[in-house]
Image: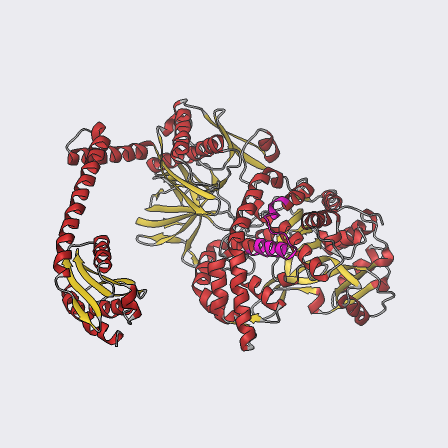
């Protein structure tokens, strides 16, 4: 057995199964497509579920992949053990009704013994105890020693999750020092002690478990295998930990270099080093697949991992942002297999750095608050932090609950998770609503997602807006139907259609379907999870029957507006790259007949100048009347030609490349204009932020852009009419009016001061005395707060031991001010208490210091009653 690097093992595996007729697919993104049952891809077979369930036809019946996966169920063990990690790669080979046990078992043995050259006397195999077929194949088609095969029960060697596809499995294990094992019991014990480790699981999906618990044999059984790349690498490299595998150890060494820590000397230090190593690996791949930090869903998983890694950096004494530099090692070691890492390097680092900076702003104050909570618990002898305090740390300081729990655990404490969950309930309900409900296999349990896989629709709408076709299927609610009649709504599938089904951000077409017996309005066109084109219709006349010949007509005006907006999004994307930089990548788009919306990664709001430059660049290229050409080519040719591909999309082998002259070239399956001049005019109507590092532009084209400009012109004309000037003089007239208003305001303030001066003399002539303290009270009209305070200051300064309490009503609201000299305060006067009591009479509240206080009120009619009460209050305070 020779040592092999992790990257070498991956390539050897994929090449081996290519030699067995398998199609090698690149790893699917970590974000599941059309699968609401998963937050993140967590197994090699997860993205292939539509092929296993039959809702989609696979590109080949034999497939092999190395799939990126994220699992956070055991996150509290990451760093504490040698084998737990949140990110891992899963090698797999799959058969969709093509080959079965007699092929896959010998292949597996060939790969591990002849390619990896693992010693046969170090290998064990387990099978399901009733699977005689697997036993026969192992013993007759391989040269394994039969004494090294053990039969185990359902808990170990039978794969099932509730109802649906399931079956026995066979696992291959490596002996890490167990010695001679002779019984199944000894084998299980050795496995529990990690003396024997499983590294490859061959699942034989041969049954369909029904609701009564019966196992019905599948006519076309499947093969689904999974081998953890990191785990087999530990075996091939003779290490005891995934953190000592070549590519992962390189990350850990970099963390040691940055922190000055030495691996293997201290238990707690090692935990922190492993946590950072694993989490940096995870977040690098997550961000490369388009995930951004947020407070819910997969964005929360990313934020939690980033902040957990940052906190462990501080435990190692790293008090500056460093994770964004550590990801360099992840990228350089993995970009050979995952080129998107290198392509998005600048973007990945920027996202990590921004999140580190945000966490750094709050972590110190958050830890300080948590330490105060811990100190409070220690004083009371408590061991449980209340849910509301844990939630405050989450909501105010950005501490994930798990981080709070981790810190508490180090102190022998825990958090009230039930109380925390109660506080979080509303957010979680929103997250659930957004994510939706789904069954295990990832297809919503509705009829339109369980259509026969042989039903196919050819899309011919690139060049046609009206065609004849035949209806192949009708769905009415949750039933297949032979017809739909006037007033009924349903779903129609046809053999060929000109209707574009919503995809790639472009909304579905609308129009009509006509036949001899009736007419239906097409309200929308979408695809189900298997990619079948569904026409959502409402019958407006007569009857639409299955198998009848129909004419399908797309709403031409709406389609033309959509085409303009879609081509404009491509031009906008290119213009943003030129104006802002190559880091700009599309993060989402929506195109309908009214407007276009384009989301992209950028880390600051666009300036007026940048928006103008982008808009101008798009319009200049519209006026150049570039031809818009589409060409079908394979994905590698497309990328080599310079076509832009969305980094979170999974493309087929053959793709459409849309070129707008020499200006823009992108992979796209949508509908476009024939030349850029058809767009007419492009106008940005808004630019805003929608998430951390994500900006959104909304724009209009063609007649909608003209309408937008006309509305602006009408508004300007209306303003000019109001100001009684021409449009060119509007700014001058506004500036002139503002200057005039300032002068008038100055005059008003001067008049108020004169009025206040007059009031000052009147108030001084009505001084009262309460327990040796001089008291001035009064009610003024239309005096603002500033003038009231200035008057109060003047009156107080004229008394050694005095109190001034004034009230005013301005614009229907009450204002009070109270001021006291030092001598008056020494004799018991307290402005805060006086104000609080009189403000309550006038329907308000407030308070302040002993020497100065102010308040407001809502009941102007009570102001005199309130001021009259001052003498009585002061008398009580100064006794």
Q: Can residue 831 be seen from the camera position used here? A: no
Q: What residue sits 21% from the left and 38% below the top?
A: 738
Magenta run includes residue 307: yes
In magenta, the rendered stretch is 304-325
Image coloring type: secondary structure
Q: Nearer the viewer, residue 437 or 518?
A: 437
**Which corner quadrant of the image does residue 336 belong to?**
top right
Q: Nearer the viewer, residue 366 or 298?
A: 366
Q: Which residue reaches farthest top?
A: 624
Q: 9 left or right of 731?
A: right
Q: Position of residue 122 (x, y in %)?
A: 85, 58
Count of all numbered marks drawn on residues in the image: 0
Q: 628 left or right of 795?
A: right
Q: Position of residue 237 (x, y in %)?
A: 80, 51
Q: Can residue 625 be seen from the camera position used here? A: yes
Q: 507 left or right of 416?
A: left
Classify 418 as above or below 745: below
Q: 604 left or right of 802?
A: right
Q: What residue sits 85% from the left and 69% below the top?
A: 182
Picture quarter with the C terminus? bottom left
**Which corner quadrant of the image does residue 213 belong to?**
bottom right
Q: Position of residue 342 (x, y in %)?
A: 62, 38
Determine the main secondary structure of the stretch shown in magenta: helix
Q: Nearer the viewer, residue 434 or 17?
A: 434
Q: Position of residue 652 (x, y in %)?
A: 58, 40
Magenta run includes residue 38: no
């Amino acid at each position: 057995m020779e040592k092999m690097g992790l990257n070498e093992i991956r390539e050897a595996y994929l090449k081996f199964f290519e030699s067995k007729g398998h199609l090698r697919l690149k790893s699917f993104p970590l974000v599941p497509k059309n699968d609401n049952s998963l937050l993140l891809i967590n197994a090699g077979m997860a993205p292939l579920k539509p092929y296993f369930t039959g809702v989609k036809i696979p590109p080949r019946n034999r497939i092999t992949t190395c799939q990126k996966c994220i699992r956070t169920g055991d996150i509290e063990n990451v760093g504490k053990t040698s084998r737990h990690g949140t990110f891992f790669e899963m090698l797999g080979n799959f058969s969709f009704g093509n080959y079965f046990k007699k092929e896959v078992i010998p292949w597996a043995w060939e790969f591990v013994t002849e390619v990896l050259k693992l010693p046969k006397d170090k290998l064990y195999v387990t099978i399901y105890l009733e699977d005689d077929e697997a036993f026969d194949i192992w013993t007759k088609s391989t040269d394994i020693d039969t004494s090294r095969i053990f039969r185990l029960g359902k808990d170990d060697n039978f794969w099932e999750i509730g109802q649906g596809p399931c079956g026995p499995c066979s696992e291959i294990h490596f002996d890490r020092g167990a010695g001679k094992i002779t019984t199944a019991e000894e084998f299980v014990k050795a496995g529990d002690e990690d003396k024997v480790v499983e590294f490859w699981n061959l699942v034989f999906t041969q049954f369909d478990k029904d609701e009564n618990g019966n196992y019905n044999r599948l006519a076309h059984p499947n093969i689904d295998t999974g081998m953890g790349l990191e785990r087999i690498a530990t075996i091939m490299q003779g290490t005891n930990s995934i953190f000592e595998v070549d590519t992962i150890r390189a990350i850990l060494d970099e963390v040691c270099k940055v922190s000055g820590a030495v691996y293997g000397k201290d238990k707690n230090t090692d935990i922190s080093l492993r946590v950072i190593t694993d989490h940096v690996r995870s977040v690098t791949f997550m961000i490369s697949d388009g995930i951004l930090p947020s407070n819910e869903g997969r964005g929360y998983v990313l934020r939690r991992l980033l902040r957990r890694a940052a906190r462990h950096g501080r435990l190692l004494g790293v008090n500056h942002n460093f994770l964004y530099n550590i990801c360099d090692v992840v990228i350089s070691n993995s970009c050979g297999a995952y080129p998107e890492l290198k392509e998005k390097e600048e973007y990945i680092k920027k996202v990590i750095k921004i999140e580190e900076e945000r966490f750094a702003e709050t972590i110190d104050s958050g830890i300080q608050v948590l330490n105060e909570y811990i100190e409070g618990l220690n004083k009371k002898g408590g061991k449980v932090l209340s849910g509301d305090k844990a939630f405050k740390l989450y909501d105010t300081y950005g501490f994930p609950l798990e981080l709070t729990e981790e810190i508490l655990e180090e102190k022998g404490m825990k958090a009230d998770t039930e109380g925390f969950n109660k506080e979080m309930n509303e957010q979680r309900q929103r997250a659930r609503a957004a994510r939706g409900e789904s069954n295990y296999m990832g297809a919503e349990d509705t009829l339109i997602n369980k259509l026969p896989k042989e039903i196919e629709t050819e899309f011919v709408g690139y060049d046609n807006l009206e065609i004849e076709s035949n209806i192949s299927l009708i769905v009415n609610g949750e039933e297949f139907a032979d017809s739909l009649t006037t007033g009924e709504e349903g779903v129609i599938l046809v053999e060929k259609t000109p209707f574009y089904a919503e995809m790639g951000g472009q909304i579905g077409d609308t129009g009509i379907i006509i036949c001899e017996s009736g007419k239906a309005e097409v309200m929308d066109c979408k695809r189900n999870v298997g990619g079948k084109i569904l026409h959502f219709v409402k019958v407006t006349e007569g009857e639409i029957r299955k198998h009848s010949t129909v004419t399908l007509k797309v709403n031409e005006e709406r389609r033309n507006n959509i085409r303009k907006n879609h081509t404009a999004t491509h031009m906008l994307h290119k213009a943003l790259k030129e104006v802002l930089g190559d880091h700009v990548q599309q993060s989402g788009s929506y195109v309908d007949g009214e407007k276009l919306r384009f989301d992209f990664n950028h880390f600051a709001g666009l300036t007026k100048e940048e928006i103008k430059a982008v808009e101008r660049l798009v319009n200049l290229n519209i006026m150049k009347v570039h031809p818009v050409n589409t060409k079908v080519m394979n994905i590698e040719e497309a990328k080599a030609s310079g076509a832009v591909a969305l980094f979170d999309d999974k493309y087929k082998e053959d793709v459409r490349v849309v070129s707008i002259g020499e200006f823009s070239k992108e992979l796209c399956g949508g509908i476009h204009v024939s030349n850029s001049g058809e767009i007419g005019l492009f106008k940005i109507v808004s630019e805003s932020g929608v998430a951390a590092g994500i900006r959104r532009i909304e724009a209009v084209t063609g007649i909608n852009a003209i309408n937008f400009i006309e509305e602006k012109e009408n508004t300007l004309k209306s303003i000019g009419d109001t100001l009684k000037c021409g449009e060119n003089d509007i700014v001058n007239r506004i500036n002139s009016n503002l200057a005039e208003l300032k002068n008038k305001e100055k005059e008003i303030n001067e008049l108020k001061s004169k009025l206040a001066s007059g009031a000052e003399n009147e108030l001084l002539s009505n001084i009262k005395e309460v327990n040796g303290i001089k008291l001035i009270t009064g009610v003024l009209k239309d005096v603002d707060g500033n003038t009231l305070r200035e008057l109060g200051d003047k009156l107080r300064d004229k008394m050694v031991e005095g109190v001034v309490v004034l009230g005013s009503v301005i614009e229907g609201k009450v204002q009070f001010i109270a001021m006291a000299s030092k001598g008056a305060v020494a004799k018991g006067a307290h402005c805060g208490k006086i104000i609080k009591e009189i403000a309550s009479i006038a329907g308000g509240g407030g308070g302040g210091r002993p020497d100065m206080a102010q308040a407001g009120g809502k009941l102007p009619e009570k102001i005199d009653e309130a001021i009259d009460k001052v003498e009585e209050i002061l008398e009580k305070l100064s006794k």
